[in-house]
């Protein structure tokens, strides 16, 4: 007899639609508050009824939750505050219902340790005249509930890497339904999703968010991750952001970050890009610590100098070089303006931390 894991695919979706199709009162809106828990990697959510259709997060009430159940507080002093900061359309409930991204604050009204947004926002305000733009290439791996890569043989491995990247066909890509559903859900929500593709390792995928200016890159990427987890839940599939989910001769997963300032995008911006790369090289260790939630320990499994990565111990840069820390796209080198790609951030990075340290180093360090 097959094991029953209790996943939502065991439930009848037509029965659910019977209830979701019931008329919703015009003066009632379901707002799902979403936040980052104490791991710095996972998201949590709960829903609140509101008696109006919110147009801006400031209109919504501050709420709270049990931080002792999210690795953020002791049971004797457990309440953590939820401050709404970004509003999205809800692709799961439709109508006027909303997804609400929140910052988290402790009993003393100071940000929790996993709230990286507040300091990122301050940095973006200081650098706003330079108009920093970001695009993040979010890689992830689909798993069965037993944590085995989705679509892989249970007692072996698929064929070596080669035919899977941007592949087409049931023997080359696994889980496209999840990818397509996620893409459309992000578009509906209002996230600036730019594209998607199958990655080098089978069952590994990528989507891109951006270009986004300032704090929006963190807001949109975190909400896109929440939506991905929620979509995968409906299919009974698990999403992993582990930077090296399968040891051995398989590609890891990153969050390559494309970054530019106004000066980089203007004529002869390549000189500004090269100056930025020099600054990044001088702060390599600082960036490595900021580029995964475990201060480089997760990335150490990925950044080996193999499988299209640089070594975690060395800084490098090059045109069209996917084995470098910083890649200058060939088109950028030819046009002498554009952006740089930082290939070091891990797939489980906090985008607020990545964006903040990039702006601090490139825009604010003199």
Image (cartoon, helix red, strand yellow):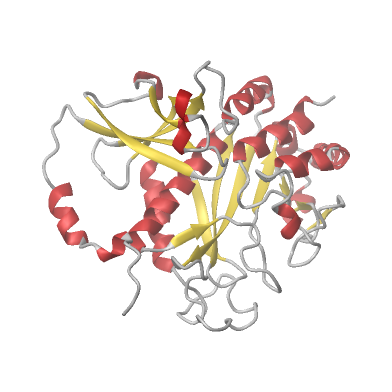
Q: Is 320 situated left or right of 14 in this image? A: right
Relative depth, front residue between 100 and 89: 100
Where residue 320 appears, x then y in whole percent? 77, 59
Rendering quarter of residue 157: bottom right
Q: Is 73 situated left or right of 255 in this image? A: left
Query: Which residue is depicted at the point 51% across and 30% down?
Result: 73
Relative depth, front residue between 338 and 240: 240
- Location of residue 288 with respect to 31 vertically, above or below: below
Q: Residue furthest top?
A: 108
Where residue 254 appears, x then y in whole percent? 65, 55
Where residue 91 appears, x then y in whole percent? 32, 46
Q: Quadrant of the C terminus?
A: top right
Query: Which residue is depicted at the point 63% across and 28% down?
Result: 120
Q: Is 247 situated left or right of 104 in this image? A: right
Q: Residue furthest front?
A: 76
- Location of residue 110 with respect to 133 vertically, above or below: above
Relative depth, front residue between 326 and 3: 3
Tally of marks: 0
Asked if one can make out residue 129 in the rendered structure from this viewpoint, the answer is yes
Asked if one can make out residue 268 in the rendered structure from this viewpoint, the answer is no
Rendering quarter of residue 231: bottom left
Q: Is 160 situated left or right of 322 in this image? A: left
Relative depth, front residue between 70 and 88: 70
Where residue 256 appears, x then y in whole percent? 66, 51
Q: Quadrant of the N terminus?
A: bottom left
Query: Which residue is depicted at the point 51% across and 55% down?
Result: 195
């Amino acid at each position: 007899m097959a094991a029953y894991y209790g996943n939502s695919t065991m439930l009848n979706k037509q029965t659910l639609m019977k209830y979701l199709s019931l008329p919703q009162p015009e003066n009632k809106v379901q707002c799902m508050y979403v936040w980052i828990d104490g791991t710095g990697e996972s998201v949590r959510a709960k829903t609140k009824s509101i008696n109006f259709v919110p147009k801006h997060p400031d209109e919504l009430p501050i709420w709270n939750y049990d931080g002792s159940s999210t690795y953020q507080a002791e049971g004797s002093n457990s309440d953590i505050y939820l401050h709404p900061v970004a509003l999205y359309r809800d692709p799961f409930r439709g109508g006027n219902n909303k997804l609400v991204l929140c910052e988290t604050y402790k009993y003393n009204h100071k940000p929790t340790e996993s709230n990286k947004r507040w300091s990122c926002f301050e940095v973006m305000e200081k650098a706003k005249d330079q108009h920093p733009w970001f695009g993040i290439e979010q890689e992830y791996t689909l798993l069965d509930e037993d944590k085995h890569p989705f679509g892989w043989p249970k007692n072996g491995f698929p064929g070596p890497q080669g035919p899977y990247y941007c592949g087409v066909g049931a023997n080359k890509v696994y889980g496209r339904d999840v990818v397509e559903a996620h893409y459309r859900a992000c578009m509906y929500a209002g996230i600036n999703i730019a594209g998607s593709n199958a990655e080098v390792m089978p069952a590994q995928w990528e989507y891109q968010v951006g270009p986004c200016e300032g704090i929006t890159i963190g807001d949109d990427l975190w909400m896109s991750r929440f939506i991905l987890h929620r979509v995968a839940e409906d299919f009974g599939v698990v999403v992993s952001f582990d930077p090296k989910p399968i040891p051995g001769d398989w590609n890891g997963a990153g969050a390559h970050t494309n970054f530019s300032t106004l000066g980089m995008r203007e004529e002869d911006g390549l000189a500004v890009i090269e100056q930025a790369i020099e600054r990044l090289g001088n702060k390599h260790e600082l960036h490595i610590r900021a580029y995964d939630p475990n201060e480089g320990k997760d990335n150490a499994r990925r950044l080996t100098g193999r499988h299209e990565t640089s070594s975690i111990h060395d800084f490098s840069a090059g045109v069209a070089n996917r084995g470098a820390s910083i890649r200058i796209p060939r088109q950028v080198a030819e046009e002498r303006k554009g952006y740089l790609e930082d290939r070091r951030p891990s797939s489980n990075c906090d985008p607020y931390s990545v964006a903040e340290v990039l702006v601090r180093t490139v825009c604010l360090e003199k």
